[in-house]
Structures are given as C-alpha cells and as structure tokens.
Image (tube, grey):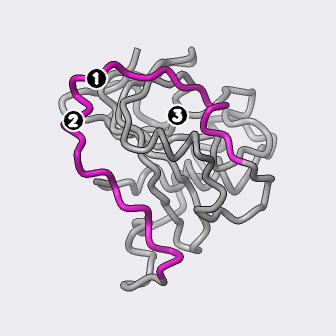
Amino acid sequence: MMRSLLYLLPLLSALVLGGCTGQSAAETRGAAGKSASQSPLEARPANPPASETPTAPVTARESVADTKAKSVTFDDIKLELKKGDPFTSEALTPKVKQLDGKLINIRGYILPSFQQDGIKQFVLVRDNQECCFGPGALLHDCVLVEMTPPATATFTVRPVSVEGVFTIHELRGPDGKHLAIYHLDGKEVK
C-alpha cells in the first residue's frame, strides 16, 4: 500500500520532529530535501518487534466505493498526545478507530513540496501557519495522502478538501520515531 514515500520522509520529519524553527517554507523544504537517503521502510529491522509492527491495512477498499464520504475534521482525529509523547495504539480514540477503513472527506492544507501539478503523494496538514506547519505539530496534525491513480492533486496555498479511504498506518523514520500514523488513499482533491 505505501508506495515510494522517500521524498515525503524529509517533509514529515520536519513537520513532526522539527516543530517551527522560524525558517521560511522554502528554507525548510530546501534543507529537508537534502536529508534522508533511504526509504523509511528500509530503515526498519527485517522483523520488527510486535509493538512496532504497523497496523494492518484494510483489505476491502472496494466496499466503500458506493458509500457517501463522511465529513471529518482534524479535531475528529485528535489524540490525547502532547509534544514529545511516544505514540502507542492505546492512544487511539474509539472515534478514530471507527474511521479506519472508511471513506472520508477532510479539509486541510497541502504541505509544500517541489512539485506543483500532477502530485501523487503529499502531506495534508491541519493549518498553514507562516512557517508552513505551525509550532509544535503533533502526529494527529497530519495525514499522509497517496492519490489513487489516475487521480492527482495540484498545489495551492488555500485549504483543500480531500476525499479518500482513511486508514491508521504507522510510518516510522530511520531513527524509529513515528513520522505519521494516518494515511488516506485519495480519490479527489477539491
């Protein structure tokens, strides 16, 4: 399910681990683009301990094709985590668990990258403050979006609405820290 996410690794690292440094969005993207030479999946041990095994992806995606998307906000997927708290599956709320595998529609901002058109993968963030991801971003403040072919997105500084199948899927960086816990198989960006 998680195709090549190599170019998103630096953006996610800056978003979740870096917080707001006062750099401009262009400086942050430029510095992030020079790091991470390996895939986040390559950085994991071959047989991770059970506590590090990603949540299994939902297999019946076709069953949601005929249903209407549920409107969701970032407040709906918020967890009781503070900056620096480690993520465990126990932190997932019943509301978040109920959304796993469901067709949703969520509004947010596309985290800037080097691509403007034909975007197949991007990070959707809660807000678009001056430094591009706001101070103290938490794991529940972003959703990793992979557009389902042939759908693509176009970058804009305005808020967008993304429709797709929401899943809980842990993504860890080379250092083993969580970079994202939410994933969306995007169908449409408006």
Closest to the observer, 70 or 6: 70
Question: Horizontal and vertical percent for residue 139?
Answer: 64, 50
Q: Earlier in the sequence, mark 3 or mark 1?
A: 1
Give the labeled residue for mark 3: 124
User: What kind of residue is marked 1?
Assistant: Thr
Q: Quadrant of residue 132?
A: top right
Labels 2 & 1 near each other (Cβ < 8 A): yes
**Between tags 2 and 3, which lies in front?**
2
How dense is the environment of label 3, judged by Cα within 10 Å: few (below 14), some, or many (20 and up)? many
Q: Quadrant of residue 183?
A: top left
**Magenta stretch bounds:** 50-79
How dense is the environment of label 2, judged by Cα within 10 Å: few (below 14), some, or many (20 and up)? few
Q: Secondary structure at mark 2?
A: helix
Give the labeled residue for mark 2: 63
Q: Secondary structure at mark 3?
A: strand
Give the labeled residue for mark 1: 67
Disc number placed over residue 45 in the picture, else none: none
184 in relation to 171, above or below: above
Q: Secondary structure at mark 1?
A: loop
User: What kind of residue is marked 3?
Assistant: Leu
The reply, left or right, for residue 66 in relation to residue 72 is left
Question: Horizontal and vertical percent for residue 162?
Answer: 43, 24
Q: Quadrant of the N terminus?
A: bottom left
33 in relation to 85, above or below: above
Q: Main secondary structure of the magenta part?
A: loop
Residue drawn at (51%, 40%) of the image: 143
Residue drawn at (38%, 20%) of the image: 189
Q: Earlier in the sequence, mark 2 or mark 3?
A: 2
The reply, left or right, for residue 8 in relation to residue 79 is left
Question: Horizontal and vertical percent for residue 190?
Answer: 41, 14
